[in-house]
Amino acid sequence: MDLQSIQVAINQIAAEKGLSEESIMETINSALAAAYRKDFGDKNQNIIFEFDPKSGKMKVSDKKNVVDFDKKIIALIDENGRDKKWVEGLVEDEESKSTESAPRPAEVGSKEVEDVLKFNPKTDILLEDAKKIKKTIKVGDELIQKLDIPEEFGRMAAQTAKQVIIQKIREAERENMFKDFKDKEGELLIGVVQRRDMRGVLIDIGKATAMMPFEEQIKTEHYNPGERMKFYLKAVNQTIKGPEIIVSRSSSEMIKKLFETEIPEIASEAIDIMAIAREAGARSKVAVKSNQENIDPIGSCVGQRGARIQTIINEIGGEKIDIIEWAEDPAKFIANSLSPANVASIDIDEKEKTVTVTVDEEQLSLAIGKEGQNVRLAAKLTGWKINIMKETSEGKKEKIELEAKDEKSTEDKKKTKKSKDSKEKKTSSSASTDAKALADKKASSSANATDDKSDDKKKESKLKKVVKKLKKAKTKIKKEDETEKPKTAKKPKQKVSKKETNK
């Protein structure tokens, strides 16, 4: 293989995998170093391979750091052997400390040993040994020894080089993918639904496959394979198998990003989104504030004939969105958050951060909403606990306890479920006993019937045998009679005339 084809192959791999030529050259050099160590090197050599694809020149060297210790430590190193790793002291586990057991030797390569490790013959060399090679060397310098360049590598060395190149390119590709998607974290992505999994739904987002867990899905949506939609990139985590990309459709941040993309006033920061409260798939409330006096925040978000807000609603599967004007006064903000209901009066308790809202009897259903949804979203949006009072036509005020009702209803439901379950168990047990009794009766009757059938069959077989014997006896008697009777000649018939018959 000539140098030009090698350079072409490097450029092709860099273009396909999206990597730089420098990273690919690093992988090739590390692979050649591993191949050299396999056939010609030593385990304590820190081999560095340098290959220039343009000129074809190669350099092989052994690189070590010069270190020095006290005489006592050097004596301990000599006892262990200068060609072996040496660790100062022993490392104890938390379990050994608690049980007061004997300390175990530290394992090289563990996190506990990284600060304790003192001498590694692969990367370090003692000053005494280094001066034998180079007299002017000092502590902290690097000792580089040139090694002979081999004419050719063996089959095993080539195989190890191939494995190292594949592994290093894969690792570099994963790192680049992690960096690319980590920079896009918190943005909207367009993806295609692939298939469902035990953990959630797999989404194809181009270079990688993302995961949408069940808690990040909208309950009312059905994710069919091949369906194209927008997703919010929630998190990117680095794992052993590669980057784990998690996307969401139920996050409130997705509403914010959709508003930024569809409404230019929000993208230009003329309008700010102050708060969002969302129940994914059902309803959302968005509080907006205008930074300019001549811009209406609600009108600009809704758009002409509701064109802007309708595109956002269609993107999230028809979920209802209430746009509310934000206000510094908490009373005004809470009154706006309870829209479309009209509020009669508001009493604020700043110490406990609770609000008592009085509503007319006609506006009560609008203020509470379906299953308390409107009040719940308003409380999330404002951050205040909201209590609702009903004002009757007579002028009396009645407090409506939504939470107590919900608790009672849940308790009643639980009780009814328990009673139903107990009744079902009783009925099932009685039914099972009846079924067992019927099965036993059927089994006994079937057994009796089988016994009767077997007896009838035996009788029939006996009768058949008797009939056969009688037939055989009859045939024998007939044969004997025929042999005993003499043979009689047949007399000829006499003709009688008509006259005689007349006489």
Image: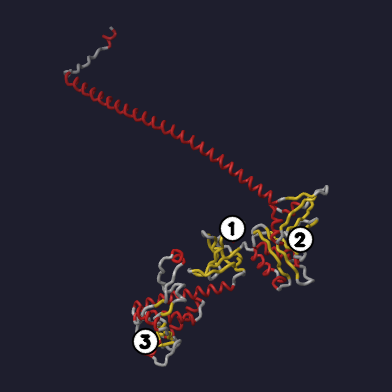
Q: Which residue is mark 2?
A: 336
* Tag 1 residue: 222
Task: Please tell me in which quadrant of the rendered image residue 256 appears.
Answer: bottom right
Task: Name the residue: 47% across, 66% down.
Answer: 94
State the residue position of label 3.
Answer: 149
Q: Earlier in the sequence, mark 2 or mark 1?
A: 1
Question: Residue extending furthest bottom?
Answer: 136
Q: Is residue 75 left or right of residue 324?
A: left
The image quadrant where one finds the N terminus is bottom left
Work out whether residue 58 or residue 40 is closer to the camera in this orientation and state it. Answer: 40
- What is the crowding at mark 2: few (fewer than 14 residues within 10 Å), some, or many (at least 20)? many
Q: Is residue 88 left or right of residue 191?
A: left
| Element type at mark 3 | loop
The residue type indicated by label 3 comes to Ile
Q: Quadrant of the C terminus?
A: top left
For the residues labelled 2 and 1, the Cα–Cα distance comes to 34 Å
The picture places residue 233, in percent across and down from the top left corner, at 59, 68
CB contact under 8 Å: marks 1 and 3: no
Within 10 Å of the Cα at label 3, are there few (<14), some (14-19), or many (20+) other Cα atoms?
Answer: few
Q: Compare residues 144 and 230 and report the one nearer the observer.
A: 144
| Badge 1 amino acid | His
Q: Amino acid at mark 2?
A: Asn
Residue 422 located left or right of residue 463: right
Looking at the image, tell me whether mark 3 or mark 2 is earlier in sequence order.
3
Quarter of the view holding residue 222 = bottom right
Q: How is the image coloured?
A: secondary structure
**Separation (CA) of disc 1 from disc 3:** 63 Å
In the rendered structure, find residue 285 and report the number of the disc placed on it.
Answer: none
Q: CA distance from mark 3 to mark 2?
A: 80 Å
